[in-house]
Image: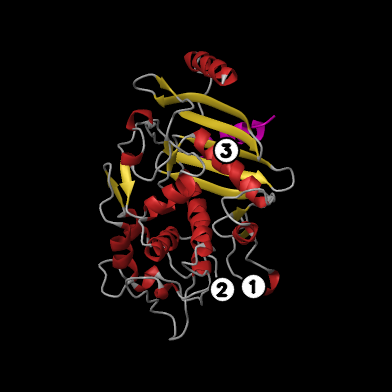
Amino acid sequence: MKKIICFIIFCAVLNACGQDKGFMGYSTAFVNEDSIIEINHVGFADRENGVLYNIKTIQPVGSVSKTFIGVSLMIALEKGLLDLDDDINKYLDFEFVNPHYNKGEIITLRHLATHTSGILDNEKAYESSYTYGLTPRLKLGDYLREYLAKGGNMYAKNNFSKDKPGTRYEYSNIASALAAYIVEKASGKPFDVFTDENIFSPLHMYNTGWYYKDISIANHAILYDERDIALKPYSCDTYPDGSLKTTIFDLSIYLKELIKGYHGNSTLLTKDSWKELFEKNFHDKDNVKHKSEKEPNTGIFMMYFKSGTLGHTGSDYGVSAIMNFDPDSGEGKIFMANEDITIKNMEEFKSIWNNIGQ
């Protein structure tokens, strides 16, 4: 703790000198399964009021949130609530229909978790899921019903791919949110409650939540656009796909647990469930089209980077985050900032990332 306090004081000097121009504020962490080795902070959580980014700063982490959907699926699987290879319509309170599919072709949770479901993010419809304010406009299930069920206000053929399920990789936020909704329906508990009871509380992540009401507003960072203009608070109907709000400390606890799980040393899940979570789903014989060059394989919402590391990236309005670990060394890194990564600060980000743990 003494080291962290000293570093915060040092950051104040850096800011006074205007030394870091890449991001308004950010935090980094370096961990292994035994400990949080290092946490650092630079810049402002709230420039207008002179609040430095610190260990209590809370902010969204974008699509890093999706890894919590993956862990939730494994917990629900262990509880006997669902099966990854079942037809998703078994769990939904509306009928999912891809108008391009023949009768008998099904979508499974595994398809959702590996972005091969054929659900596409219609840009205009997905943007409508965002609203200014502290609460989403629609409930998760209501938004998904409007987008995925015949007769819905946003239902359209271009919401879906013509490719058969499991044959084409197409990253989808809405498909991810649907997986979280299935956890909700299968468990009988709202997804935010399910994750709090089964992940946040057991791991003592006391400053983590999906909604503004679940966290300390006083500690929430102001988010900034690439021009360093403060953004108004916003919410998203499909909140499980990217709206998790947390601190660098809490996320470090979580990453430690992922590393422990990978090596069979965590009790949050059984060894078999951890293996399923991380197991690669794409194989040469599968011939899945359009796979990401940077993230060529995936577990259950756990991305394999080209470097061989495992984890996820996150991006949103005024938000950037990366969390991954090296399976061989057992070391993990986190970066989270209250400004998105753009061409303007990409080189700065690379320098920051490469120096974590050095």
The kind of residue on which mark 3 rests is: Ile
**Which circle's residue, 2 or 3, is located before the other in the chain?**
2
Percent coordinates x, y for residue 73 in the rendering: 50, 60
**Which part of the image, by quadrant, shows the C terminus?**
top right
Foreground: 207 or 313?
Answer: 207
The picture quadrant where one finds residue 295 is bottom right
Residue 35 visible in rendering: yes
| Residue ID at (53%, 26%) | 41
Percent coordinates x, y for residue 159 in the rendering: 38, 68
Could you tell me if the residues under marks 2 and 3 are in contact, i.e. CB atoms within 8 Å?
A: no
Q: Which residue is mark 3?
A: 334
Residue 242 visible in rendering: no
Question: What SS does tag 2 mark?
Answer: loop
Query: Is the magenta region chiefly helix, strand or loop?
Result: helix
**Label 2 Cα neighbours within 10 Å, binned few <14 / some 14-19 / many ≥20:** some
Q: Which residue is mark 2?
A: 167
Percent coordinates x, y for residue 179 in the rendering: 44, 62
Question: What SS does tag 3 mark?
Answer: strand
Residue 287: mark: 1
Foreground: 304 or 154?
Answer: 304
Q: Residue 355 in magenta?
A: yes
| Residue ID at (38%, 45%) | 210
Magenta residue span: 343-358
The picture quadrant where one finds residue 58 is top left
